[in-house]
Amino acid sequence: MAVGVASLSGANGLALAQQDYPSRPVRVIVPFAPGGQTDVVARLIAQRLSDKLGKQFYVENAAGAGGNIGVGRAAQAAPDGYTIVFIDSIAFAANPSLYAKVPYDPVADFDAVAIGATTMQVLAVNPSVPARTVQELVALIRAEPGKYSYSSAGVGTGAHLTGELFKSVLKLDMLHVPYGGGGPAIAAAIAGHTQISFGSAAATISQHQEGTLVALAVGGKARLKGLPNVPTFLEAGYDVVCEAMVGLLAPAKTPKDIIALLNKEVAAVVAMPEVRDRLATLGFEVSSPSPEEFGAVLKAELPKWADVIRTAGIKTAQ
């Protein structure tokens, strides 16, 4: 991540960007199918950027290969500010280790711009499991190695990687059962096909509130507003953090003043009460770091997930 390239270039440059950019529509690549979390966040922000900046920010979905197709397309675009890409930070950082080859270099090909929203994975159990804290669950798993299984949205997803991080940090023996999406994975845990679920905040909050699942821990550095009584893994004493950022990147060497302008405008958009409220209903929370801060966080994700993938021996169909 060329963090230094994303630094502010001074008041004159920013004024020039505000005056001249954008002068035509901006392509916003989403490397996933319509309707998913990244797509919903991207469209929410793109529409308001269009309104604020006077030119259309239009979403182009380029799904496939776990996000690699769309991210690769963005990497090849001209660094002029007229192609930007919204990523899922976990997929972006993990895919170079999950796949034999990806069509982008996560460090060299992009400049960090802004974080649109952040969510986290949630550990939950079927109500029949006699555990109401994550410590109690860990004791159960250790007492009967191999008995317990957890569901995820699929091999290599954020839920799967969080489950494997949890297993690795605590040295647990439990089975991973992948499903074809977050909905089926949550449903499997509700039905008791697996005792444990690692799932998205949006899906798990509603099930916890309805009593069909019991949330035990969240993967953020701080508690989730939608689950205020559920501790983080860190609070429970376990070094497990899994936050997924829907982040905005630009091709490397995009002008600094354009990156600064986009960072400022995205921050203004996600500060709008109606946007914050909509994101909250989706299990997202808002933060507005600088491009440099976002770039540093994203860089740190690369070795973290590479280590999890290597330790667990995770491989995708390629």
Image (cartoon, rainbow, N blue to C red):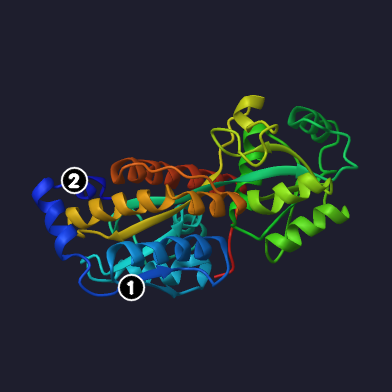
What kind of element bears circle 2? loop
Q: Quadrant of the C terminus?
A: bottom right
- What residue sits 62% from the left and 34% below the top? 169
Expressed as whole percent of the image width and height from the top left, the position of residue 4 reads 21, 45
* 230 with respect to 293 (left or right): right
Query: For mark 2, what is the residue?
Result: 8
User: In the image, is residue 201 above or below residue 238?
Assistant: below
In the rendered view, does 48 fall on the left or right side of 15?
right
Q: Is residue 222 above or below residue 318?
A: above
Q: Are marks 1 and 2 in contact (CB under 8 Å)?
A: no
Which residue is at a point 28% across and 68% down the rendered structure image?
Answer: 54
- What x and y, as percent, mark residue 294? 36, 44
Q: Is residue 166 visible?
A: yes
Q: Check disc 1 and report its element: helix, strand or loop.
A: loop
User: Is 203 above or below relative to 129?
Assistant: below
Residue identified by numbered label 1: 56
Q: How many marks?
A: 2
Q: Could you tell me if residue 193 is visible in this image?
A: no
Where is residue 90 drawn, in percent x and y?
A: 50, 52
Q: Quadrant of residue 109?
A: bottom left
- Between 130 and 36, the one lying in front of the other is 36
Of circles 1 and 2, the one toward us is 1
Identity of the amino acid at label 2?
Leu
